[in-house]
Amino acid sequence: MPGGGPGWAVPLPTIDPQIVARSAAASAAYGPDFHYRHHIAVRWLPVVFGGAVGLGLLFLAAQVPPLRKGLSRLRSPGTGPDAATRARSRFTVRFVAETADGRVVTEVSGGDPGYGETAKMLVESALCLAYDELPPTAGQVTTATAMGDALIERLVRAGLRFTVLTPAGTETD
């Protein structure tokens, strides 16, 4: 769990594992035994069940036209959290890598992921593609394959944090 303490790691059904696997297949740097799993950390198991039931009901409601119309009225387009709420928002994603030689834990963190940091990522990706020296690629490639370290350097300059945590829990950059 971020910050320590007991909790549950629950598989998170997103497209990220397929994208990471595609990047790994395109680069020998990942190694032949590379595997990736994607989980969300929760402190209380009932949150998992409540979230699954809630998402299931939301999905079903979105399939029924009158309910879908009602759902669309819950939030008007163009509304969202105010500036003060966005200023308080943060995200942290933790990655754990295990090899025969040991274990490395890293974190990526930043401010509001829904607005500010997403905008930074999109803009820095566009600038990276337009101006940076990148490896030759062709076809449909992932972000890691197309931009790799050049994008990471841009994101760090834009304020996102990429931190390697030692096993003792102290930070090194």
Image: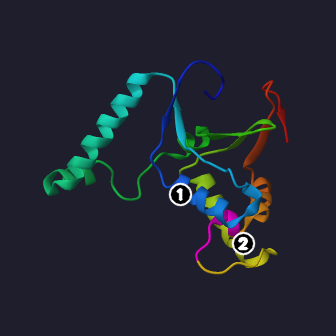
Left or right of 143: which side holds 168? right
Does residue 141 belong to the magenta stretch?
yes
Q: Where is residue 118 in the image (x, y as percent from the top left)?
A: 59, 56
Quarter containing the C terminus: top right
Q: Which residue is more in the foreground, 104 or 50?
A: 104
Q: Which residue was labeled with disc 2?
A: 127
Quarter containing the N terminus: top right
Q: Where is residue 49 in the image (x, y as percent from the top left)?
A: 35, 29
Q: Which residue was labeled with disc 1?
A: 18
Q: Where is residue 87 in the image (x, y as percent from the top left)?
A: 61, 42
- Amino acid type for the residue under numbered disc 2: Leu
Q: Give the range drawn in magenta.
A: 140-145
Left or right of 159: which side holds 19? left
- Amino acid type for the residue under numbered disc 1: Gln
Q: Between label 2 and label 1, give the one nearer the viewer.
A: 1
Separation (CA) of disc 2 from disc 1? 25 Å
